[in-house]
Image: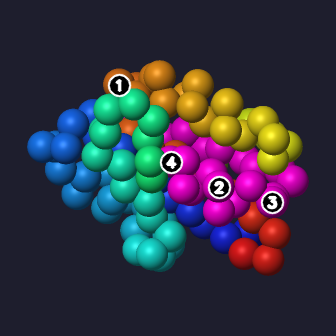
Amino acid sequence: MGKLIGYARVATKEQGTDRQEMDPLAAGIRRDDLYVDHGASGINFILRDLIACQREALQRAVFLLQRQRHVRALLAADQLHRVFHFVAGDILGAVLALSYFQNDVAYFYLLGFPGG
């Protein structure tokens, strides 16, 4: 499996991300590979940087994990079935489109980076 990258987001700067960070870290994502966004208005700067640093990859798989689901339970039940493959030029639009569902999506993983 490729390098694991995590992304956690909350809607406001006042909200904590501790809960969103626990599951990715428990699933083996290194803390320095976990990007956290505190809901800055306008473009999500952390997300922009995450996408920019991974743009050279040819394919991505985005696993959406719902806020009330636990990562270990998903892995054990093999329920990571919502996978989307994107070429590098399309990932920005796809991830930004997913960000509109911020009430439903707590965090997601980008997997399959070359050399990861």
Front-lying residue, 23 or 4: 4
Indicate the secondary structure of the residue bearing disc 3. Answer: loop
Q: Which residues are magenta?
A: 47-70
Kindly report the distance in space between the C-alpha atoms of the residues bearing marks 1 and 2: 24 Å
Q: Residues within 10 Å of mark 3 (few under 14, many from 20)?
A: few
Label ID, residue 103: 1
Label ID, residue 56: 3
Q: Amino acid at mark 4?
A: Leu
* Disc 4 target residue: 47
Kindly report the distance in space between the C-alpha atoms of the residues bearing marks 4 and 3: 16 Å
Give left or right: position of 105 versus 97: left
In the image, residue 45 lies in the stretch drawn in magenta: no
Q: Amino acid at mark 1?
A: Asn
Task: Examine the rendered structure and indicate whether residue 54 appears above or below residue 42.
Answer: below
Residue 43 figure quarter: top left
Indicate the secondary structure of the residue bearing disc 1. Answer: loop
User: Which of pointers 4 and 1 lies earlier in the amino acid sequence?
Assistant: 4
* Disc 2 target residue: 52
**Residue 75 seen from this side:** no
Q: Amino acid at mark 3?
A: Glu
Task: Examine the rendered structure and indicate whether residue 54 appears above or below residue 98.
Answer: below
Q: Amino acid at mark 2?
A: Ala
Give left or right: position of 41 versus 92: left
User: Which of pointers 1 and 2 lies earlier in the amino acid sequence?
Assistant: 2
Residue at screen point 79% across, 77% down:
115
List x then y, in percent, for residue 20. Answer: 32, 51
In the image, residue 48 lies in the stretch drawn in magenta: yes
Residue at screen point 31% across, 39% down:
40
Q: Residues within 10 Å of mark 4 (few under 14, many from 20)?
A: some
List x then y, in percent, for residue 86. Answer: 80, 40
- Whether the residues at callouts 1 and 2 have beta carbons within 8 Å, the answer is no
Indicate the secondary structure of the residue bearing disc 2. Answer: helix
